[in-house]
Structure formats: C-alpha cells, structure tokens
Amino acid sequence: MTVATLSQWVAGSRPRTLPASLVPVAVGTGVAAGDGHAVWWRALLAAFVALVLQIGVNYSNDYSDGVRGTDEERVGPLRLVGSRAAPPKHVLAAALGSFLAAAVAGLVLAAVTTWWLLLVGALAILAAWFYTGGKNPYGYRALGEVSVFVFFGLVAVVGTVYVQAEGLPWEAWVAAVPIGLLACGLLVANNLRDIPTDRESGKRTLAVLLGGPWTRILYAACTALPFMFVLVLAAPHPWVLIALLAAPLSLPPTRKVMNGATGPDLIPVLGETGRLQIAYGVLLAIGLAL
C-alpha cells in the first residue's frame, strides 16, 4: 500500500492557499482591537478554526477530484489521490479529521458567545465538503468564487469580529469585502491555469464558462478593487492608508495574467497573490487596530 511522506502531506495541504484562512482573522482582530474589544485567546482559536478548515477543504478537494479522475492530468501542486501518492481513504480521513478539529474549536467559541455560531460553522463545513464532494458539487457549477467570497471574506472577517466584540460594526462588513476579493483572486488564478484540463474533464468552473480573456480581467479586478475599499475605511480610520503600501505587490502577478501566461507559467502567480493577500491583510489589520 502506498504511504505518502510527510513532505507530500504538507504539499497536499496546498500551503500557498493557507493565507486565505489566516488573513481574514487578522483583519477581523484588527477591527475588534480598534474598538477596544480584542480578546486574544478567542482570536487565536478563530485562527485555528480557519486554518484547519482550509486544510480540510484542500484535502477534501484532493479526495473528491481524485476519485473522479479530474486530477490525473492536472498542472500545479501535488494532488495526493490523483498522483497516487496516498490512498483515497487516507486523504478522506485527513479531511474529516480537519473538519472535526475545526468543529471542536468552533464549539468552544460558540459556548462563550452565542450558539447560533454552530449553524454558521456547520454551513462552512458543508460548503467545504460539497465544493467538490457529493453527486453535484457546486465547484463544478461555477459557484466556487461565490463560496470563497462568502466564507473567506464575509463570514471569516465578520465572524472573527463577533467572537471578540460580540457585535457587528460596519467596519467589519466593509473590511470583509476586499479580503473576500483577494481570496477569490487565488481561486481565479488557479482555475485560469486549469481551464484546459477542467474543460476536458467536464468541470465547469467560472473560468471555463468565462473563457481565458474574461477570467484574466476578473483576476485583475480581484487584485485592484481591494485598494478602493481602503479609501472607504480611511475617512474614520486614516491609519488604514498604510495598506496602500501593498499595491506594488499586485503588479507582478497581474502583469503575468494579463500578458497571457498559461499552464505552469501561472503557478508563480498563486504564490505572488498569496504574498499580496498577506501584506494587504496585515497592513489593513494594523491600520484598523490603530
């Protein structure tokens, strides 16, 4: 029986995507700190929930795409099932274990705030599984970006604020939008790279439906529009203008995408988009906290 190595398991967790889970927590904590309501142990627990949920999503996608055979010719990071580095049941167990860890930590946060958070957590786990799992995965129906925007933008930022401040200030909602857009940028770049193989396997992502040119424009919008929201937040919170320092980081990946990069040439775009997301999120969080 094939047994994946530790390095393969780490690669299979798709570490370049993990900033999408931690950045929203940082921004939400910045909002809470700015209002004087930061509770650091709750922030750390929220970060743990977000991180293991993202890892669970990645393993779940690996499992579901792998057993369908859609990952066998995929360009990009290692797929554990598609490459036969690990048996499907092992990857499924890793996904379910990650979801369980997120659920337990989420239960603690719900116990100290409000029990309706359990419903939000359950919806997040269901969304994670049915992205590529089940008979009719919505990730194959061009709804992946919508889910990422909702759960890695709105839910993650606003939820982080709520578990600390137990309130929903308007800044939480406004700050959640650019974070959701940058998370979508990661998915858009990933799906742009995979258009040929996704089209061949019948996976109808938004990129497949839009085609290459419009998908490239969508990516550019996801990396540019977040800086417009800095100006909205700057009126009551002028320190958030420091987030504009991250703007130069948006240029290299956007240039590659708009110049027609395809296949393996788009792989660096994922890392560069992740670095943009980290820089923007950290600077925005600091600005909001100040």
Image (cartoon, helix red, strand yellow):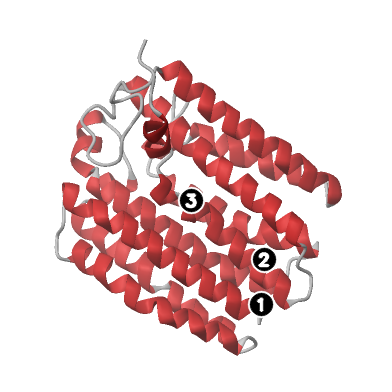
Residue visible at 14% across and 65% down? 259
Expressed as whole percent of the image width and height from the top left, the position of residue 130 reads: 50, 32
| Closer-to-camera residue (120/165) | 165
Amino acid residing under circle 3: Val
Q: Which mark is residue 266?
A: none
The residue tagged 2 is 29
Residue 116 seen anywhere in this rendered image of the structure: no
Give the alpha-carbon distance from disc 3 to disc 2, as whole Å.
Answer: 20 Å
Q: Quadrant of residue 275?
A: bottom left
Q: Amino acid at mark 2?
A: Thr
Q: Are marks 2 and 1 in contact (CB under 8 Å)?
A: yes
Residue at image position (37%, 44%) is 142
The residue carrying mark 1 is: 289
Q: Return the residue found at the far top.
A: 1
Q: Nearer the viewer, mark 3 or mark 1?
A: 1
Quadrant that contains the N terminus: top left
Report which residue position mark 3 lands on: 148
